[in-house]
Amino acid sequence: MSGEQLAFLMKDDDGNVQIYTVSPNGGAIKQVTNNPFSVASTISWSPDGKMIAYAGDDSVFVTEVSSGKTSRVAPKDAARPVLALAVDFSHDGKQIAYERVVKGADGERNQIFVTKLAE
């Protein structure tokens, strides 16, 4: 990533937490996401700086920074919700790791899942 933009979380006019960017040199703030739900986790830049991954709506999403196009990349599963923790791109940008709560005979556990992105 080149460091041309800083990403941060801030509420929109509807009260949902969205992703915004701004140049580290100052300038206009750009709203990147416009979801009907709040971003619920930290954000992760793709290695090429073109996408941001995050958790929200009990799932994992990727948004293209230039267009704001958002895609759900992990299925929503109310029985195994995605945790509002770190969602991280792999070093090659082809996979995203995240955590879900998984119920077992001995209780609930947080487990790491990986989803591959379409090429």
Image (cartoon, rainbow, N blue to C red):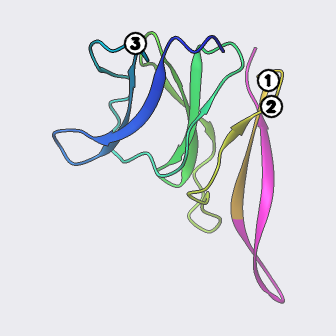
User: Can you say which quadrant of the picture contains the C terminus?
Assistant: top right
Residue 94 got which mark? 1
| Residue 115, quarter of picture | top right
Question: Spatial distance from mark 3 to mark 2, Cα to Cα?
Answer: 28 Å
Q: Earlier in the sequence, mark 3 or mark 1?
A: 3
User: Where does the image place residue 73, in percent across and percent down from the top left?
Assistant: 63, 35
Marks 3 & 2, CB-CB < 8 Å contact: no
Residue 45: percent from left, percent from top: 62, 27
Residue drawn at 79 percent across, 63 percent down: 111
Q: Nearer the viewer, mark 3 or mark 1?
A: 3
Q: Position of residue 42 (x, y in %)?
A: 55, 46
Amino acid type of the residue tagged 1 in the rendering: Lys
Against 45, residue 113 (above or below) is below
User: Which amino acid type is marked by label 2?
Assistant: Ser
Counting other residues with Cα less than 10 Å from the Cα at mark 1, is it few (<14), some (14-19), or many (20 or more)? some
Q: Which mark is residue 25?
A: 3
**SS state under label 2:** loop
Quadrant in which the N terminus appears:
top right
Main SS category, magenta section: strand
Q: Residue under circle 2?
A: 90
Q: Residue at x 80, y 43 (%)?
A: 114
Q: Which residues are magenta?
A: 101-119
Asked if the residue at tag 1 contacts the one at tag 2, i.e. Cβ–Cβ closer than 8 Å, the answer is yes
**Is residue 83 a member of the stretch shown in magenta?**
no
Compared across the picture, whether 119 is left or right of 83 comes to right
Q: Point out the residue furthest to the left here.
A: 13
